[in-house]
Image (cartoon, rainbow, N blue to C red):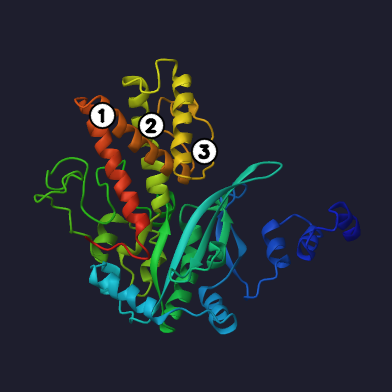
C-alpha cells in the first residue's frame, strides 16, 4: 500500500506524510501528532467537549498539548537560540519609562525574556465540509527570525464545534498557566496576550462590549449617560482617560462571576497585557468602513470617476488605483473593484479587502481625496472625510516607520 501511494505521488511525498496515510482516519488529530516528528515531548490533557448525543451534552476527550517550558528548554538548551541582553533590557526599560501598567507592576527583572501568547481561529475547507478550529501559539517578541513561521510555536488546537463556552479552553489555560509560572522562575515573563475581539471575548467573557452600555473592559467608558464617561469625550473633562482598572476592578466590574479565566493566576498578570490584533482592528474593520465611505463620496456625490453606473465608476477608480501603485512601484494582489465589494446584500457599506490591500486602498483614497479637495474647496463633507483619512494615514505611517517600539511624541 505504501508503495502504491508513493507511486501515485510521483515519489514526492515525505516519509512522514506517507506514514500519516497508513492511519485509520478515525481520529485525525491523534494521527497527525503520532506521525509528526516533534523534537519536544508531547503530553496529553483531558478536556470537556460538547457532544449533542449525550444526556448532559458533554463528554471528556483527550487532546495533545505542548508546554511552554518544554519548548523554551529545547530552544535555548538544544537549538542554542541567543537573544541580545541589550534588546531585553531596552524592552523593559522602555515599557516602564512609558508607563505600561503590566511592566510597572511586574516583579520581573530587566533580564526576564518576554513571552507572548496568541490565540486565533481559522476555517479549514475539506472535501466534505468547512470546519473551524481554534489554536494557541507561543512566541518571543524579541525573537524575530527571517521567517515568521519559525517564531510561532503551537501549544494546543481543537475544533471550535467542540468548545463548551470557555469551559473547554479554561482547562487548557490552567495547564499553560502552571507552565508559564514555572518559566517565570527561569527568567521568562509573559508580557502579551494577543488575539482579535472574538478570541478575547470568548476567553474572558467580558460584560463590556461595543454593543453594550459599558464599551471598554479596561476603563469605565460608556456609550451614554454621564458626559464625563462617554467614550467620545477624551478632553480635559473626561472621566475615563488615564483611569484604567486595577486587577481587582477588572475582575469585579468586567468579568462574569463564574468560569473565571485561569490566566488571572499568571505571575504578574495585569489587564493591560491583553492586546488586540491591530490588523483585525484597523485593516480588517476600521478600513472597511472608512474606505467605503470615502469611495462612495467620490463616486456618488462628486462623480470624481465619471457619471456612469456605479460599476463603471469602480472600473475607472480601479485604473486610477493601479496607476497610483505603479507610480510608486508598490506590488499588491488587489483584484478589480466591483460593486459587491462595497455594497453588501444586507445594506452595509464596507469595502472589504485583504489587510495589506486595504492599507494601500486607504493611501490611494487619501491622495485622491486631497486632489478632489482642490477642485471642491468649499465642500464640507469632503473636507471632513479628507481630514479623517489623512489622520488615519498618519497613524499607519507612525506605526510603520518605527522599529521595535512606538515612542510618545
Mark 3 and mark 2 lie on one chain; the one further toward the N terminus is 2
In the current view of this chain or complex, which residue is farthest to the left? Answer: 237
- Tell me whether circle 2 and circle 1 mark residues in contact (CB < 8 Å): no
User: Image point 32% across, 56% down: which residue?
Assistant: 255
Frontmost residue, 251 versus 406? 406
Q: Is residue 38 left or right of residue 200?
A: right
Q: Where's residue 219, x and y in %?
A: 23, 55
Report how far apart the C-alphas of labels 2 and 1 lie in the structure: 21 Å
Q: Which mark is residue 103?
A: none
Q: Which residue is mark 1?
A: 374
Disc 2 on helix, strand or loop? helix
Along the line of sight, the residue nearer the viewer: 362 or 163: 362
Q: Nearer the viewer, mark 3 or mark 2?
A: 3
Residue 298 in the image: x percent, y percent?
34, 26
The residue under label 3 is: 334
Q: Measured from the top left, where is residue 15 in percent x and y?
A: 79, 65
Q: Residue furthest front?
A: 327
Q: Is residue 57 above or below residue 78?
A: above
Q: Is residue 228 above or below residue 75?
A: above
Q: CA distance from mark 1 to mark 3?
A: 28 Å
The answer to which of 96 and 195 lies nearer the viewer is 96
Residue that mark 2 sits on: 292
Near mark 1 (Cα within 10 A), the count class, few <14, some 14-19 or many ≥20, is few
CB contact under 8 Å: marks 3 and 2: no
Amino acid at each position: 500500500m505504501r508503495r502504491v501511494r508513493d507511486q501515485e505521488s510521483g515519489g514526492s511525498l515525505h516519509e512522514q506524510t506517507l506514514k500519516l496515510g497508513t492511519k485509520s482516519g478515525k481520529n485525525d488529530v491523534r494521527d497527525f501528532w503520532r506521525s509528526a516528528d516533534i523534537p519536544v515531548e508531547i503530553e496529553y490533557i483531558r478536556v470537556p467537549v460538547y457532544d449533542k448525543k449525550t444526556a448532559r451534552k458533554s463528554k471528556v476527550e483527550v487532546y495533545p498539548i505542548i508546554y511552554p517550558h518544554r519548548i523554551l528548554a529545547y530552544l535555548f538548551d538544544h537549538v542554542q537560540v541567543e537573544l541580545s541582553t541589550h534588546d531585553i533590557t531596552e524592552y523593559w526599560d522602555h515599557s516602564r519609562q512609558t508607563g505600561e501598567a503590566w511592566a510597572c507592576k511586574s516583579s520581573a527583572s530587566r533580564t526576564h525574556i518576554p513571552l507572548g501568547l496568541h490565540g486565533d481561529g481559522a476555517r479549514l475547507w475539506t472535501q466534505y465540509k468547512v470546519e473551524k478550529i481554534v489554536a494557541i501559539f507561543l512566541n518571543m517578541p524579541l525573537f524575530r527570525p527571517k521567517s515568521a513561521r519559525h517564531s510561532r510555536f503551537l501549544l494546543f488546537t481543537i475544533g471550535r464545534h467542540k468548545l463548551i463556552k470557555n469551559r473547554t479552553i479554561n482547562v487548557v489555560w490552567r495547564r499553560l498557566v502552571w507552565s508559564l509560572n514555572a518559566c517565570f522562575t527561569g527568567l521568562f515573563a509573559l508580557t502579551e496576550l494577543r488575539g482579535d475581539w472574538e478570541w478575547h471575548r470568548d476567553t474572558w467573557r467580558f460584560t463590556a462590549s461595543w454593543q453594550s452600555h459599558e464599551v471598554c473592559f479596561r476603563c469605565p467608558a460608556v456609550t451614554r449617560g454621564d458626559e464625563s464617561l462617554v467614550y467620545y469625550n477624551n478632553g480635559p473633562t473626561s472621566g475615563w482617560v488615564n483611569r484604567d482598572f486595577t486587577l481587582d476592578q477588572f475582575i469585579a466590574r468586567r468579568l462574569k462571576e463564574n468560569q473565571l479565566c485561569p490566566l488571572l493566576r499568571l505571575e504578574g498578570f495585569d489587564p493591560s497585557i491583553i492586546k488586540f490584533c491591530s490588523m483585525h482592528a484597523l485593516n480588517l474593520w476600521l478600513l472597511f468602513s472608512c474606505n467605503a465611505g470615502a469611495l462612495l463620496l467620490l463616486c456618488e456625490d462628486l462623480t470624481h470617476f465619471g457619471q456612469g453606473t456605479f460599476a463603471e465608476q469602480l472600473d475607472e477608480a480601479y485604473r486610477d488605483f493601479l496607476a497610483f501603485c505603479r507610480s510608486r512601484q508598490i506590488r499588491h494582489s488587489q483584484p478589480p473593484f466591483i460593486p459587491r465589494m462595497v455594497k453588501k446584500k444586507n445594506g452595509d457599506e464596507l469595502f472589504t479587502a485583504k489587510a495589506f490591500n486595504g492599507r494601500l486602498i486607504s493611501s490611494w483614497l487619501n491622495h485622491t481625496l486631497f486632489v478632489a479637495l482642490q477642485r471642491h474647496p468649499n465642500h464640507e463633507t469632503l473636507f471632513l472625510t479628507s481630514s479623517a483619512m489623512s489622520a488615519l494615514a498618519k497613524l499607519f505611517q507612525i506605526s510603520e516607520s518605527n522599529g521595535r517600539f512606538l515612542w510618545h511624541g
